Image (tube, rainbow, N blue to C red):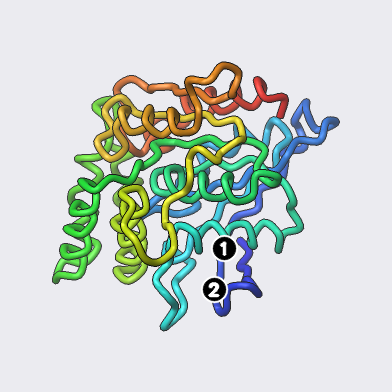
């Protein structure tokens, strides 16, 4: 798996998997756009690897990376606290470094609710479409949840405290033992420093929505997202409830006729959908891409 140092972000190394279209694809005679996959908090590029075969078999090049502060992409020493805006810039620079001008974006959790919409709003000419899986919508009430997580992982238990709770609380009732074990492994593969930095991104994001003055606006302007959008929500997702997904889509103009934005709710599923039910997610992604002619 390659490692890329971005010239525009000093000393930030991005570990990623670059998965080519499979040679047996019946679609390889037609050029398909590349797909960039951005995972959520406490995760890694491996979150996507049960989904990507369904996409590469259609002829898509899939690039899945470890986001800054996650897994094998540690934050450089003394680096500034990441923000939604800085992460969006980093990922657009990452695409440029790979000589990719336009792409489909698929995000999960914080990437789905914050970073991918920020990329689509700030660089509409580069985002062909977006799939938001379990997107976290920032609210004032959400901030204390992540501040509490920060306090817990900074304690003696470290990431073990998250690994002992999240796999059992954040997956849906249909999830078996293997998906819970996978989520546990993803969490234990995080550094405390990187996890805390990404918790702070989410905890601070609501301030832009509430109109707090000072500093940069950390939250994307959802109303500026013009690309077609599919939101995939888990019926039992407590981290990204269906109500927040609907609110986000309304701000994107979901209720306007012909805007190409819609919501799918997966029954009995929680927050880690690509681990819980990759085939269900893949089916919805492929259907959406076909609808958009991509």
The residue that mark 1 highlights is 90
Relative to 129, residue 280 above or below: above
Q: Quadrant of residue 175?
A: top left
The residue that mark 2 highlights is 12
Side of 14 relative to 126 (left or right): left
View extreme (right): residue? 29
Q: Earlier in the sequence, mark 2 or mark 1?
A: 2
Q: Which mark is residue 22?
A: none
Relative to 44, residue 150 above or below: below
Side of 76 relative to 214 (left or right): right
Give the residue displayed 52% in from the left and 43% down from the top.
Answer: 49
Q: Quadrant of residue 136?
A: top left
- Residue 29: x and y in percent read 85, 31
State the separation of the CA atoms marked 2 and 1.
9 Å
- Residue 13: x and y in percent read 56, 71
Give the residue displayed 59% in from the left and 42% down from the top.
Answer: 105
Mark 1: give few (<14), some (14-19) or many (20+) Cα within 10 Å: many
Side of 57 relative to 48 (left or right): right
Nearer-the-camera pick, 81 or 190: 81
- For the residues labelled 2 and 1, say whether their Cβ atoms are less than 8 Å apart: yes
């Amino acid at each position: 798996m390659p490692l890329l140092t971005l010239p525009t972000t000093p000393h930030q190394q991005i570990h990623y998997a670059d998965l080519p279209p499979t040679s047996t694809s019946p679609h390889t005679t037609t050029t398909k756009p590349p797909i960039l996959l951005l995972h959520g908090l406490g995760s890694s590029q491996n979150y996507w690897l049960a989904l990507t075969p369904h996409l590469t078999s259609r002829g898509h090049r899939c690039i899945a990376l470890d986001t800054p502060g996650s897994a094998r992409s540690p934050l450089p020493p003394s680096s500034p606290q990441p923000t939604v805006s800085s992460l969006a810039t980093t990922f657009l620079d990452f695409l440029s470094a790979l000589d990719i001008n336009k792409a489909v974006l698929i995000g999960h959790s914080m990437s789905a609710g914050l970073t991918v919409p920020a990329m689509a709003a700030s660089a509409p000419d580069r985002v062909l479409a977006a799939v938001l899986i379990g997107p976290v919508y920032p609210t004032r009430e959400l901030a204390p949840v992540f501040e509490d997580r920060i306090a817990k992982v900074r304690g003696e238990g470290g990431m073990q405290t998250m690994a002992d709770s999240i796999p059992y609380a954040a997956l849906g009732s249909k999830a078996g033992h293997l998906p819970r074990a996978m989520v546990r492994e993803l969490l234990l593969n995080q550094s405390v420093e990187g996890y805390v930095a990404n918790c702070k991104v989410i905890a601070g994001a609501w301030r832009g929505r509430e109109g707090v003055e000072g500093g940069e606006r950390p939250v994307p302007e959802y109303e500026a997202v013009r690309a077609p959008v599919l939101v995939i929500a888990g019926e039992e997702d407590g981290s990204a409830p269906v109500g927040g997904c609907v609110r986000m889509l309304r701000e994107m103009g979901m209720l306007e006729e012909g805007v190409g934005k819609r919501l799918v709710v997966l029954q009995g599923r929680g927050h880690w959908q690509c681990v819980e039910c990759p085939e269900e997610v893949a089916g919805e992604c492929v259907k959406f891409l076909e609808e958009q002619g991509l």
